[in-house]
Image (tube, rainbow, N blue to C red):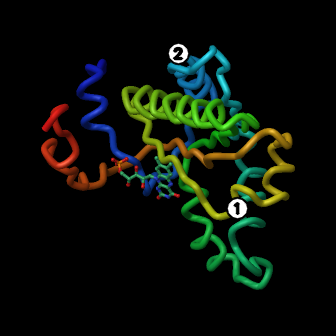
Amino acid sequence: MTLSVRDAVLQRRSIKLFNGQQVDKKAVMEILDDAKWAPNHGNRQPWRIVVGAEEQLPKVHELLRDLAVPKWQELSEDALAIQMKKFTLAGAYAFVLVTEDVRQKERLEDYAAAACYLQNVQLLAWEKGIGTCWKTPGFLDNPKFREALNAQPHERVISMFQFGYYDNVPNVRTRKDLSEFVTEFGQ
Ligand SMILES: Cc1cc2nc3c(=O)[nH]c(=O)nc-3n(C[C@H](O)[C@H](O)[C@H](O)COP(=O)(O)O)c2cc1C
Protein backbone atom coordinates (compact mmCIF):
# COMPACT_ATOMS: atom_id res chain seq x y z
CA MET A 1 0.00 0.00 0.00
CA THR A 2 1.32 3.42 -0.89
CA LEU A 3 0.24 6.21 1.41
CA SER A 4 0.30 9.87 0.58
CA VAL A 5 2.61 11.88 2.80
CA ARG A 6 -0.44 13.56 4.29
CA ASP A 7 -2.15 10.26 5.06
CA ALA A 8 1.02 8.90 6.67
CA VAL A 9 1.39 12.02 8.83
CA LEU A 10 -2.25 11.99 9.89
CA GLN A 11 -2.72 8.26 10.33
CA ARG A 12 0.53 7.20 11.99
CA ARG A 13 0.22 6.44 15.67
CA SER A 14 2.82 5.41 18.19
CA ILE A 15 2.31 1.74 18.91
CA LYS A 16 2.60 0.87 22.56
CA LEU A 17 1.39 -2.73 22.34
CA PHE A 18 3.12 -4.86 19.73
CA ASN A 19 2.02 -8.39 18.91
CA GLY A 20 5.34 -10.21 19.25
CA GLN A 21 6.01 -10.82 15.55
CA GLN A 22 9.63 -10.12 14.64
CA VAL A 23 10.48 -7.46 12.09
CA ASP A 24 13.00 -8.53 9.46
CA LYS A 25 16.36 -6.83 9.76
CA LYS A 26 16.25 -6.11 6.04
CA ALA A 27 13.05 -4.07 6.40
CA VAL A 28 14.52 -2.15 9.33
CA MET A 29 17.70 -1.42 7.37
CA GLU A 30 15.72 -0.19 4.36
CA ILE A 31 13.75 2.19 6.53
CA LEU A 32 16.86 3.48 8.31
CA ASP A 33 18.55 4.02 4.96
CA ASP A 34 15.64 5.88 3.35
CA ALA A 35 15.20 8.06 6.43
CA LYS A 36 18.69 9.55 5.99
CA TRP A 37 17.22 12.12 3.59
CA ALA A 38 16.03 14.04 6.64
CA PRO A 39 17.03 17.70 6.72
CA ASN A 40 20.12 18.34 8.81
CA HIS A 41 22.27 21.42 8.97
CA GLY A 42 25.73 21.35 7.42
CA ASN A 43 25.04 17.81 6.24
CA ARG A 44 26.43 16.66 9.59
CA GLN A 45 23.97 13.74 9.71
CA PRO A 46 24.41 13.73 13.48
CA TRP A 47 22.66 10.44 14.17
CA ARG A 48 24.07 6.98 14.79
CA ILE A 49 21.90 3.91 15.08
CA VAL A 50 22.56 0.56 16.73
CA VAL A 51 20.15 -2.04 15.40
CA GLY A 52 18.99 -5.02 17.41
CA ALA A 53 16.94 -7.42 15.29
CA GLU A 54 16.53 -11.11 14.55
CA GLU A 55 19.48 -13.01 16.07
CA GLN A 56 20.40 -10.03 18.27
CA LEU A 57 17.04 -9.91 20.04
CA PRO A 58 17.85 -12.33 22.88
CA LYS A 59 20.92 -10.26 23.83
CA VAL A 60 18.90 -7.04 23.58
CA HIS A 61 16.26 -8.50 25.88
CA GLU A 62 18.93 -9.56 28.38
CA LEU A 63 20.35 -6.06 28.46
CA LEU A 64 16.92 -4.46 28.87
CA ARG A 65 16.07 -6.92 31.63
CA ASP A 66 19.26 -6.02 33.51
CA LEU A 67 18.59 -2.31 33.12
CA ALA A 68 14.85 -2.15 33.68
CA VAL A 69 13.72 -5.00 35.90
CA PRO A 70 14.98 -4.60 39.46
CA LYS A 71 15.91 -7.84 41.23
CA TRP A 72 14.83 -9.89 38.24
CA GLN A 73 16.74 -12.89 39.61
CA GLU A 74 14.22 -13.10 42.44
CA LEU A 75 11.19 -13.27 40.15
CA SER A 76 9.53 -16.43 38.94
CA GLU A 77 9.88 -17.16 35.22
CA ASP A 78 6.25 -16.15 34.68
CA ALA A 79 6.50 -12.93 36.66
CA LEU A 80 9.64 -11.99 34.76
CA ALA A 81 8.00 -12.77 31.43
CA ILE A 82 5.13 -10.43 32.31
CA GLN A 83 7.50 -7.62 33.29
CA MET A 84 9.47 -8.15 30.09
CA LYS A 85 6.46 -8.02 27.77
CA LYS A 86 6.92 -4.33 27.02
CA PHE A 87 10.31 -5.29 25.58
CA THR A 88 9.78 -8.75 24.16
CA LEU A 89 6.63 -7.95 22.16
CA ALA A 90 8.51 -5.42 20.03
CA GLY A 91 9.80 -6.90 16.79
CA ALA A 92 13.11 -5.04 16.45
CA TYR A 93 15.10 -2.26 18.08
CA ALA A 94 17.04 0.78 16.99
CA PHE A 95 19.03 2.55 19.69
CA VAL A 96 19.56 6.10 18.55
CA LEU A 97 22.53 8.28 19.41
CA VAL A 98 23.09 11.91 18.51
CA THR A 99 26.29 13.90 18.43
CA GLU A 100 26.52 16.40 21.28
CA ASP A 101 28.37 19.36 19.89
CA VAL A 102 30.03 21.65 22.46
CA ARG A 103 28.50 24.60 20.60
CA GLN A 104 24.91 25.21 21.75
CA LYS A 105 23.53 26.22 18.35
CA GLU A 106 24.96 23.16 16.63
CA ARG A 107 23.82 20.92 19.48
CA LEU A 108 20.23 22.14 19.10
CA GLU A 109 20.37 21.78 15.34
CA ASP A 110 21.69 18.25 15.67
CA TYR A 111 18.99 17.13 18.10
CA ALA A 112 16.35 18.66 15.83
CA ALA A 113 17.87 16.89 12.81
CA ALA A 114 17.87 13.56 14.67
CA ALA A 115 14.18 14.12 15.51
CA CYS A 116 13.48 14.79 11.81
CA TYR A 117 15.34 11.58 11.00
CA LEU A 118 13.27 9.61 13.49
CA GLN A 119 9.99 11.02 12.23
CA ASN A 120 11.05 9.91 8.74
CA VAL A 121 11.68 6.46 10.21
CA GLN A 122 8.23 6.44 11.82
CA LEU A 123 6.44 7.46 8.63
CA LEU A 124 8.41 5.08 6.39
CA ALA A 125 7.75 2.20 8.77
CA TRP A 126 4.06 3.06 8.95
CA GLU A 127 3.80 2.85 5.20
CA LYS A 128 5.17 -0.71 5.38
CA GLY A 129 2.63 -1.67 8.04
CA ILE A 130 5.27 -1.61 10.75
CA GLY A 131 4.50 0.25 13.94
CA THR A 132 7.04 2.22 15.93
CA CYS A 133 7.46 3.94 19.23
CA TRP A 134 10.12 6.44 20.20
CA LYS A 135 10.81 5.56 23.83
CA THR A 136 12.86 7.44 26.38
CA PRO A 137 13.19 5.07 29.34
CA GLY A 138 15.06 6.16 32.45
CA PHE A 139 18.15 4.13 31.61
CA LEU A 140 19.17 6.06 28.46
CA ASP A 141 22.12 7.63 30.32
CA ASN A 142 22.98 4.51 32.31
CA PRO A 143 26.72 3.73 31.85
CA LYS A 144 25.97 0.03 31.34
CA PHE A 145 23.58 0.90 28.52
CA ARG A 146 26.03 3.38 27.00
CA GLU A 147 28.77 0.78 27.14
CA ALA A 148 26.60 -1.78 25.34
CA LEU A 149 26.07 0.74 22.54
CA ASN A 150 29.71 1.78 22.51
CA ALA A 151 28.52 5.35 23.09
CA GLN A 152 31.36 7.83 22.85
CA PRO A 153 31.71 10.80 25.24
CA HIS A 154 30.39 13.16 22.55
CA GLU A 155 27.29 11.01 21.94
CA ARG A 156 23.94 11.10 23.73
CA VAL A 157 21.51 8.21 23.57
CA ILE A 158 18.14 9.75 22.71
CA SER A 159 15.90 6.79 22.09
CA MET A 160 15.19 3.17 22.59
CA PHE A 161 13.24 3.02 19.38
CA GLN A 162 10.92 0.07 18.92
CA PHE A 163 9.60 -1.43 15.70
CA GLY A 164 6.88 -4.01 15.63
CA TYR A 165 3.70 -5.38 14.21
CA TYR A 166 0.40 -4.63 15.89
CA ASP A 167 -3.17 -5.90 15.96
CA ASN A 168 -4.78 -2.61 16.90
CA VAL A 169 -4.06 1.04 16.30
CA PRO A 170 -4.50 3.03 19.50
CA ASN A 171 -7.21 5.66 19.63
CA VAL A 172 -6.00 9.00 18.46
CA ARG A 173 -5.36 11.53 21.20
CA THR A 174 -6.92 14.82 20.27
CA ARG A 175 -4.73 17.66 19.17
CA LYS A 176 -5.23 21.37 19.71
CA ASP A 177 -7.23 23.29 17.14
CA LEU A 178 -5.15 25.28 14.72
CA SER A 179 -6.37 28.53 16.29
CA GLU A 180 -4.87 27.51 19.62
CA PHE A 181 -1.33 27.32 18.33
CA VAL A 182 -1.25 29.54 15.26
CA THR A 183 -1.70 33.27 15.12
CA GLU A 184 -1.18 35.57 12.19
CA PHE A 185 1.75 37.93 12.25
CA GLY A 186 0.86 41.36 13.63
CA GLN A 187 -2.31 40.25 15.44
C1 LIG B 1 10.87 12.51 22.26
C2 LIG B 1 9.80 11.50 22.50
C3 LIG B 1 9.90 10.64 23.58
C4 LIG B 1 8.91 9.67 23.79
N1 LIG B 1 9.05 8.81 24.85
C5 LIG B 1 8.10 7.88 25.05
C6 LIG B 1 8.25 6.93 26.11
O1 LIG B 1 9.23 6.93 26.84
N2 LIG B 1 7.28 6.03 26.28
C7 LIG B 1 6.17 5.99 25.47
O2 LIG B 1 5.30 5.15 25.67
N3 LIG B 1 6.02 6.83 24.43
C8 LIG B 1 6.97 7.78 24.22
N4 LIG B 1 6.85 8.63 23.15
C9 LIG B 1 5.68 8.50 22.25
C10 LIG B 1 4.66 9.54 22.58
O3 LIG B 1 4.15 9.34 23.85
C11 LIG B 1 3.59 9.49 21.51
O4 LIG B 1 4.09 10.10 20.42
C12 LIG B 1 2.32 10.15 21.97
O5 LIG B 1 1.63 9.20 22.69
C13 LIG B 1 1.49 10.67 20.78
O6 LIG B 1 0.96 9.60 20.09
P1 LIG B 1 1.11 9.41 18.53
O7 LIG B 1 2.56 9.32 18.24
O8 LIG B 1 0.37 8.16 18.30
O9 LIG B 1 0.48 10.59 17.89
C14 LIG B 1 7.81 9.58 22.91
C15 LIG B 1 7.74 10.45 21.81
C16 LIG B 1 8.71 11.39 21.59
C17 LIG B 1 8.61 12.28 20.38
Decide which of 140, 176 is in the foreground and name it: 176
Estimate the x, y position of residue 178 in percent, counting from the top left: 16, 42
Give the SS element for disc 1.
loop
Decide which of 7, 21 is in the foreground and name it: 7
Determine which quarter of the picture holds residue 187.
Answer: top left
Q: Which residue, given by chain and number where applicable, does mark 1 sit on? A: 139
Farthest-out residue, front: 186
Q: Is residue 82 above or below residue 130?
A: below
Residue at x-position 66% and y-position 39%: 96
Estimate the x, y position of residue 104 in percent, counting from the top left: 66, 38
Residue at x-position 69% and y-position 73%: 69
Q: Is residue 8 left or right of residue 163?
A: left
Estimate the x, y position of residue 41 in percent, counting from the top left: 58, 19
Determine which quarter of the picture holds residue 181.
Answer: top left
Mark 1 close to ligand 1, CB under 8 Å: no
Crowding near pointer 2: few (<14 within 10 Å), some, many (20+)?
few
Residue at x-position 39% and y-position 33%: 126
Q: Is residue 31 above or below residue 133?
A: above
In the rendered image, which quarter contains the N terminus? top left
Q: Which residue, given by chain and number where applicable, does mark 2 sit on? A: 37
